[in-house]
Amino acid sequence: MKRWVLSIFVLMCLFPLAAQEDLLHAGVALLLRGEPSQAAERFAQLLRQGSDGAEVWLWRGRALMSAGDLRAAEVAFARADRLHPGEGALWLARLYVTEGDRDKAFQALRKHLASPWRRPRREILLDTLLEPLERDPRWRSLWQKEWYDRRQQAFDEILGALAIGRGEEALQVCKSIRAQYPEDPVLVALEARAYLRQGDVKMARKELKTFPLAAHEDTTFLLSRAWVAAAAGDHAHAAATYERLFHLQPDGFHYLLRAATEWEEAGDQKNALKDLELYLRYFPADAEALTRAGELHAAEGNLREAMRLLSLAVKEDPGNPIRFVARADVYMKSRTYRYAIQDYGMALDLDPVNGQVYYRRGEAYLKTGQLKNACFDFERALHYGVREAQKYLMEYCGDR
């Protein structure tokens, strides 16, 4: 009885946290979908519920800034900066650049660089919102001060080398700095990536496995673990890691898509669908995700749901022949050949040299007894390199 009561209590404590995480994701998704005012309201709702963290204030500030309400955005960024001194200052610098106030922008940027929340040097230098500051003489003097210690400089060097494919160079920097910071999860993660870049999956896995589990909440470490697991063929592990990354990063929706891909590689269509459907809760008009989910439902035999999703994909992306082909394939499975012929025809209108689509439409024509049309399509399919069409031409179109 006591254990049952304790379980109920734990669930009651976790439910508000899960609801708040969902609300945060919903707000970020609205912002990414170009609906900043609605996003700002979601973040305000979170704040009213007691989620008075710097992260929420930063996202609210970003939404308000995108909506053009710069005064309210400044208030939100300043509130975040009071909670985490220096973190909100970077967004204040960006906002002041937008307003044309370079004095305040430099002041805020210096505060950020002097704080433990400073972003990597490489990231700041490539920040397009801060680009106008580069034309100011103060930009050069700003970087004359050494804001980053040797460890942070090494991160930049490693990431820079990896970005241009220099795995050996990245590995050398990792090894030179690891001796000073043997327990740093980010360095372990980057060293694993360097091995992976060189194609040495075995060593990459070894690096990650020897590290304590306590550090596995670091997002850089987790991303490396997902990449290495996928490269090693451990797709279920990679998928679960991508799911964890999604829960740790409010804007990590792409991790759900990666997780779905890895679940498919692992042969687990149920979990792949779960992740795709969660992604579609936040981005219901994403034609690619709708198509993938529809195809998975079709593979599971859920043809009605597959048709619903694929019809939405066609509606959202009517200029893409892939959407029509995917729906036509489901019509074929449901034996509604007339509609399949129509969709294959729409796909060919958009991509008239696709031999595979001619081949599939030829099969649909055969099912409806339209031999002349079928033979025409098989001839076109063969012309565009689909050799499988030859057997149909020999069997049904020999007199032509």
Image (cartoon, grey):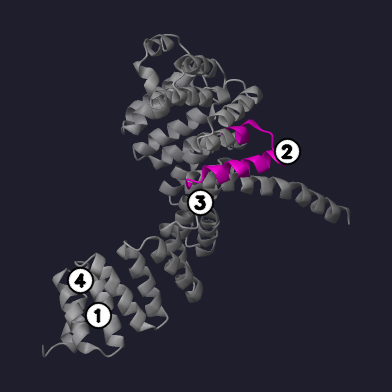
| Helix, strand or loop for disc 4 | loop
Q: Which type of secondary structure does the marked residue at label 2 adopt?
A: loop
Say which residue label 4 marks.
386
Circle 3: residue type: Leu
Image marks 3 and 2: residues in contact by CB distance under 8 Å: no
First in sequence: mark 1 vs mark 4: 1
Tell me the tag on residue 256. Answer: 3
Q: Is residue 245 visible?
A: no
Quadrant housing the N terminus:
bottom right
Disc 3 or disc 4, which is closer to the eye? Answer: 3
Q: Which residues are magenta?
A: 33-58
Tell me the kind of residue under disc 2. Answer: Gly
Closer to viewer: mark 1 or mark 2: 2
> Mark 2 or 4 closer to N-term?
2
Circle 2 sits on which residue? 50
Q: Residue furthest left?
A: 400
Residue 146, compared with residue 248, is above or below; it is above
Q: Is residue 129 magenta?
A: no
Residue 393 rendering spot, x and y as whole percentages:
17, 83
Contact flag, marks 1 and 2 (Cβ < 8 Å): no
